[in-house]
Amino acid sequence: PAAVGGESACPAAAADLPPPVPTLLAAPYGRRIRLVYPPPTTGRAEVRRLPEGIHPPLPGTVVDDADRLGVPVPAMGPGLAVDAHQAAAVTDYVVLSIGRTAAVAGASSAYVRLPAASGLHWSEGMLRWTWPPGCTEVVVLSRADAPPAGPDDPLASRRKVTNTRYELDAGLPVAEPAPLHVAVFACIRRADRLYVASEASATARTTIT
């Protein structure tokens, strides 16, 4: 990859570079944020909390100066770091594979803390809710067998809804048969990137029976 700030294409021999960590999951853990990744088979990895305004490097990017990517998140064991930092609306993380001469960027993840929708209910074939202040987009997830586990639940159906569409339709039409577990996740846009809230509170969940 091309050099970006403290990252470069080839500061070390390829044989010295560890493989990038493929996944990173950020999830709430009480007031903390739990960051889970597959531990590397050789060497070590560390998670960095990115400074505000810094975008995570692409996986596979060689990182010469890891400190440009923020502070390390305390490790709690292989494949686990826990951040006690009180997250802003959006907190980005990246996991680095640490080699002898350089680090390699792996997967990134964001923990997104936004005001939740409220009053979610179903009536006459429509879902309706009260939008959080300033929110113009939400992601609605639904499952027949269980409540959606999060905004990226692979077993849930997913729909993005704008406030304009919601107002035109006077709600969100629901065609799926009951029972149906529904959760509404608020969204925010930053630098043309859509961030989806990491959690949906009880006020933004309902079950259609």
Image (spheres, helix red, strand yellow):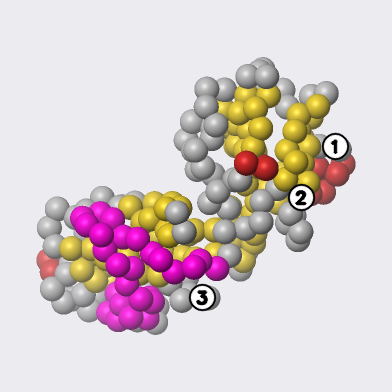
At x 43% / y 60%, what residue is drawn?
Answer: 32
**Percent x, y of residue 18:** 18, 63
Q: Nearer the viewer, residue 179 or 119?
A: 119
Which residue carries the number 3 mark?
52
Please provide percent x and percent y for residue 131: 76, 50
User: What amino acid type is highlighted by mark number 1?
Assistant: Asp
Q: Is residue 133 above or below residue 17?
A: above
Mark 2 vs mark 1, CA separation in Å: 15 Å
> Please, what is the three-letter code of the amino acid marked with disc 2?
Trp
The residue at the point 82 percent across, 49 percent down is 164
Task: Classify 10 as above or below 79.
Answer: below
Task: Tell me what residue is drawn at x 39 percent, y 51 percent.
Answer: 25
Q: Which is more N-terminal, label 3 or label 1?
A: 3
Query: Mark 2 = which residue?
Result: 131
When asked about the image quadrant of residue 11, the answer is bottom left
**Residue 109 in view, yes or no:** no
Q: Amino acid at mark 3?
A: Glu
* Disc 3 to disc 2, C-alpha distance: 26 Å
Q: Earlier in the sequence, mark 2 or mark 1?
A: 2
Local secondary structure at mark 1: helix
Instruction: Assign a secondary structure to mark 3.
Output: loop
Q: Which residue range is magenta in the image?
A: 63-88
Tell me where residue 96 appears, x and y as whole percent. 28, 66
Judge by depth and name the residue closer to the eye, 90 or 59: 90
Circle 1 residue: 169
In the rendered image, residue 85 lying in the magenta stretch gets the answer: yes
Quadrant including the N terminus: bottom left
Report the side of 109 relative to 198 (left or right).
left
Crowdedness of circle 3 by 10 Å Cα count: few (<14), some, many (20+)? few
The number of numbered badges drawn on the structure is 3
Residue in view at x 72 percent, y 23 percent: 175
